[in-house]
Image (tube, rainbow, N blue to C red):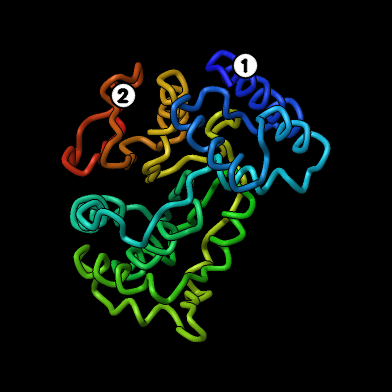
Amino acid sequence: MSDTTEDIEIELLLEALFQRYHYDFRNYARASIKRRLAQALTQLGFTTLSALQDRVLHDPKMLPRLLDFLTVQVSEMFRDPSYFKALREKVLPHLSTYPSLRVWIAGCSTGEEVYSLAILFKEEGLYDRTIFYATDINPDALAAAEAGVYAVDRVRKFTENHQRSGGKSSLSDHYTAAYGRAVFDSSLRNRVVFSDHSLVTDAVFAEMHLISCRNVMIYFDRPLQDRAIGLFRESLARKGFLGLGSKESLRFSTHAPAFADFVPEDKIYQRREP
């Protein structure tokens, strides 16, 4: 298949997903989309993207299977421990001055970061005054996040990260292990709202004190990155905080002047005064 034919098929498939199901991947980084669609063809048993498009359009049950390839679900609890240590030591002392808090985990995937932040806020005495909004575009990922069940062989890494982040409790205090699974305590979800939300098409839905959107925008092209950062700017309360992934930056965004470096080495920014 020539590159020209492949490019046409990709354009048509992404447009079909948008028109039929309102999932918009049209401005995702094209190299990443190509890799993921190649994997989807192999593992779903299709020889062409046109055949995959036909199936997705006429069989809605195929959509979640395709979304599993198009949305990235690679994470771990307390990933990049220095980020969570910086939140603990430098951001939460500021947030502790507020009587109530709202935290948005944008692109929460299967929930590892949600539980990381819930545990962190519990350890720092802020959990009971915080509402966490955990959003993603993948319904299967959201369901997994809300369940809070992970393979027990992943917990050793979770525990190491938690300790390196300055954890004040034992991670084992927060889950029950049985039958090869670690089930995180339901109390960690009491103040979490799990919801579908797209950074591509949806609008701001509340004023936030902290937004954590890590390793999501690396899959967007530049205009879509700018749109997402604009959403965060609009959503953040005065002097609120934004955390990005280690390979992400505000440097090229038109919204960069609205933010000040707060912990630049961990990609934590603060919303400037309006």
Give the image location of residue 190, x and y in percent: 54, 68
Image position of 38 (left or right of 225): right
Residue positioned 43% across, 50% down in the render = 103
**Which of the pair 100/181 is nearer the observer?**
181
Give the image location of residue 97, x and y in percent: 29, 54
Foreground: disc 1 or disc 2 = 1
Seen as rendered, the residue at the extreme top is: 4
Give the image location of residue 24, x and y in percent: 61, 29
**Which of the pair 78/178 is nearer the observer?**
178
Residue positioned 19% across, 51% down in the render = 90
Tell me the residue that label 1 is attached to.
Answer: 8
Tell me the distance, in whole angstroms, between the alpha carbons under discs 1 and 2: 38 Å
Seen as rendered, the residue at the extreme front is: 1
**Which of the pair 70/8 is nearer the observer?**
8
Relative to 175, say whether 166 is above or below: above
Image position of 204 (left or right of 256): right
Seen as rendered, the residue at the extreme right is: 58
Name which residue type carries label 1.
Ile
Tell me the residue that label 2 is attached to.
Answer: 258
The circle drawn on residue 51 is none
Residue positioned 50% across, 30% down in the render = 34
Image position of 4 (left or right of 121): right
Dot 1: within a 10 Å radius of its alpha carbon, few (fewer than 14), some, or many (20 or more) residues?
few
Instruction: Check the picture and name the quadrant holding the N terminus.
Output: top right
Q: How many marks?
A: 2
Residue positioned 46% across, 77% down in the render = 182
